[in-house]
């Protein structure tokens, strides 16, 4: 799954489709606006309206025509901004595409009611609406099969094709427990315990939660923990991120299949129970949105595909088709 370079501006050339690659390109149609559920509004200048809605509590920014410009969720740092349309695709693993105008950015602090009046907000929002640098969704695709590698000034490969983990000693399947610092090959100082020490055998690998920590933590700056308990950052394992992670829990784990699709927006984390213990969430992915078939699609690092995928090898990457992951979906969180 090769991810093409970032497109800048609203009017850009179409990126050619590469066989077996994740690609994205601009489109001419915009995603539908999220409907409001309450009517409390506050005017802020002649062009934008900041409207408070519920389920979860959030501020929806609308333009003069009523179209959704952005959504800010109370207690969460992930902000959804409606920008230039683009598409994500993985021809090697699925015929589906995700066509979206959603760009997911991290706020400098968790949102709270009235946040639009804060001193930092106006400049941040103006910049974010024009920003075409990689966001959560694009960064998430930069670790797929055949994704081009890139190193920073220190020579650390921070993006490029990631595997899931080393082959098990039995030769059947791949090992879990590869964290983001294993992918990077560098030690990581955690604020709440010993530094993470990379395993050479795991260089370039991330399991499902390590992948989420790579995207939101290492790449986007969200604090990271080395434990599975509550604290000021992202815990290590999927069950701990669901229960103790930052942000707001959108769908609670009730030990049965979740179907609260309307609660989701692109960039949310979705959690699954796919292994033996029915009470332990053991897989996590990043929700991409509704694909061209009308299905709710996510991307995650998986053993069968040997790394991050939005495809359907070893089970469809869908929440609503009755497949392995669909029936195993249990909870969701907005960071």
Image (cartoon, rainbow, N blue to C red):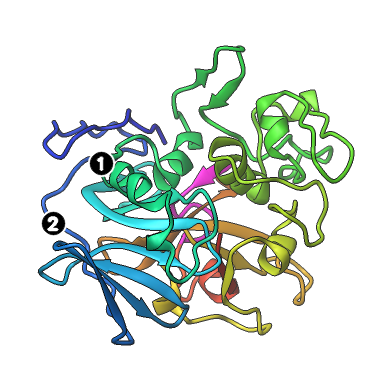
- Is 182 drawn above or below residue 50 in the view shown? above
- Residue denoted by label 2: 29
Task: Select label 2 or label 1 by which is in front.
Answer: 1
- Is 98 drawn above or below residue 281 in the view shown? above
Which image quadrant: the N terminus? top left
**In-front residue for pair 235/163:** 235
Indicate the position of residue 21 as horizontal and vertical percent values: 36, 35
- Is 249 drawn above or below residue 12 in the view shown? below
Residue 316 covered by magenta stretch: yes
Quadrant in the rendering for residue 39: bottom left
Which mark is first along the chain, 1 or 2? Answer: 2
Residues shaded magenta: 306-317
Indicate the position of residue 64 as horizontal and vertical percent values: 12, 67
Task: Using the rendered image of the protein, determine whether residue 112 is visible from the camera's viewpoint.
Answer: yes
Q: Please tell me which residue is depicted at 39% across the width and 52% down the height of the picture.
A: 121
Q: Please tell me which residue is depicted at 41% across the width and 64% down the height of the picture.
A: 72
**In-front residue for pair 288/243:** 243
- Residue denoted by label 1: 130
> What SS does tag 2 mark?
loop
Number of marks present in the image shown = 2
Residue found farthest to the right:
194
């Amino acid at each position: 799954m090769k991810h093409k370079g970032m497109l800048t501006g609203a009017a850009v050339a179409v990126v050619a489709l590469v066989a077996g690659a994740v690609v994205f390109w601009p489109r001419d149609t915009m995603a539908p606006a999220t409907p409001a559920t309450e009517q409390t509004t506050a005017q802020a200048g002649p062009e934008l309206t900041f409207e408070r809605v519920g389920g979860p509590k959030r501020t929806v920014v609308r333009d003069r025509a009523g179209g959704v410009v952005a959504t800010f969720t109370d207690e969460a740092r992930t902000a959804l901004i409606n920008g230039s349309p683009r598409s994500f695709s993985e021809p090697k693993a699925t015929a589906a595409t995700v066509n979206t105008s959603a760009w997911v950015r991290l706020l400098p602090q968790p949102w709270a009611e009235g946040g639009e009046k804060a001193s930092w907000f106006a400049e941040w929002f103006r910049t974010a609406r024009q920003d075409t640098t990689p966001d959560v969704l694009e960064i998430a695709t930069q670790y797929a099969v055949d994704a081009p590698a890139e190193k920073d000034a220190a020579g650390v490969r921070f993006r490029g094709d990631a595997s899931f983990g080393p082959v098990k000693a039995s030769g059947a399947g791949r090992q879990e427990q590869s964290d983001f610092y294993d992918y990077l090959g560098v030690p990581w100082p955690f604020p709440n315990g010993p530094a993470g020490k990379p395993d050479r055998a795991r260089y370039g690998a991330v399991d499902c939660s390590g992948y989420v920590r790579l995207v939101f933590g290492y790449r986007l700056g969200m604090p990271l923990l080395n434990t599975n308990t509550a604290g000021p950052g992202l815990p290590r394992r999927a069950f701990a991120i669901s229960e103790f992670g930052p942000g707001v829990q959108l769908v609670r784990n009730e030990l049965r299949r979740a179907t609260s699709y309307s609660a989701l927006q692109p960039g949310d984390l979705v959690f699954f129970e796919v292994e033996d213990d029915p009470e332990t969430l053991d897989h996590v992915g990043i929700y991409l949105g509704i694909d061209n078939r009308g299905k709710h699609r996510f991307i995650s690092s998986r053993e069968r595909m040997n790394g991050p995928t939005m495809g359907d090898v070893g089970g469809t990457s869908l929440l609503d088709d009755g497949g392995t992951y669909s029936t195993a979906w249990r909870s969701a969180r907005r960071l």
